[in-house]
Amino acid sequence: MADLQDRLARIQAKITALKEKDPDLNLFGSESHTYKLNEPLSNQTLTTFENEHQITLPQDYRAFLEQIGNGGMGPYYGLETLTDGLCSSLDYKDEKYGVQTLSEPFPHTDDWNAPGYKEGMSDEDYDAWQELCFQDKEVFGLLRIANFGCGVSINLVVNGPSYGEIWVDDRNNDNGVYPDFYFGNEERLGFLEWYELWLDKSIEEFEKA
């Protein structure tokens, strides 16, 4: 627990440092989140969410929500709130697009895409292939945490064998789902590792300028 508190304190200091380095909101996505974090959530609110969805949030993510903020400043266009993380689409946060099922496990441990894709396939075959891609069961257990843009979401696995890892849902671009290596990391990342790596890379960007 001490290590977790040390990491949260370090992250809080880096949040302040990054804000100070970018008063003009030049960092990609900063005009969207403006370096603001929403109010943290209470332990009771988090427990109610967990009970409702029959999950236990990863400890590092839960601590962030409770001690730092419930969405706002973060990678790409910012962190989603916990409840917005339930939206099937972050581009269209509307109930008609459905909500994520967290109570069932995310089935994947390695890159996945629906089988059968072929260059030059007919529209009919492509539509059938896309139906396979977009079966709800392929993204059970994924909580949406950030909108990458272009229909791509960044997600935290909250149920299943890849529990606690950050994964990309890139099915809108026919690329399936896969662990997040966008920050140049060679290892799979948990939430705080991912968030702190973003802070480090963003701070470095300004120090190099």
Image (cartoon, grey):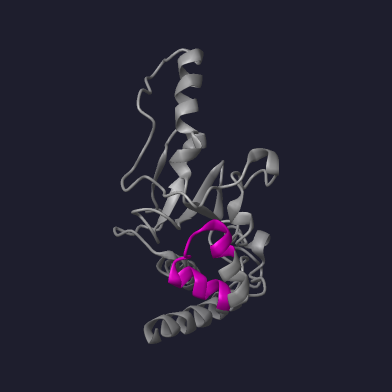
Q: Position of residue 194 (x, y in %)?
A: 43, 64
- Residue 35's quadrant in the figure? bottom right
**Main SS category, magenta section:** helix
The stretch drawn in magenta includes residue 61:
yes
Q: Is residue 183 magenta?
A: no
Q: Is residue 27 visible?
A: no
The residue positioned 66% from the left and 71% from the top of the image is 38
| Depth check, front residue: 8 or 14 | 8
**Which segment did they paint magenta?**
49-66
Q: Quadrant of the N terminus?
A: bottom left
The residue shown at (61%, 75%) is 44
Q: Residue at x 64, y 66 (%)?
A: 25
Q: Is residue 62 left or right of residue 183?
A: right
Q: Which is nearer the eye, 68 or 46?
A: 46
The vertical placement of 62 against 28, above or below, is: below
- Evaluate whether residue 185 shows in this view: yes
Image coordinates of residue 105 in percent, x first then y, are: 42, 50
Task: Out of 32 and 54, give the one closest to the viewer.
Answer: 54
Residue nearest the viewer, comparing 75 with 101: 101
In this rendering, the count of numbered labels is: 0
Query: Which residue does the image show at 44% across and 71% down from the upper left?
Result: 59
Image x and y of residue 126, in percent: 47, 19
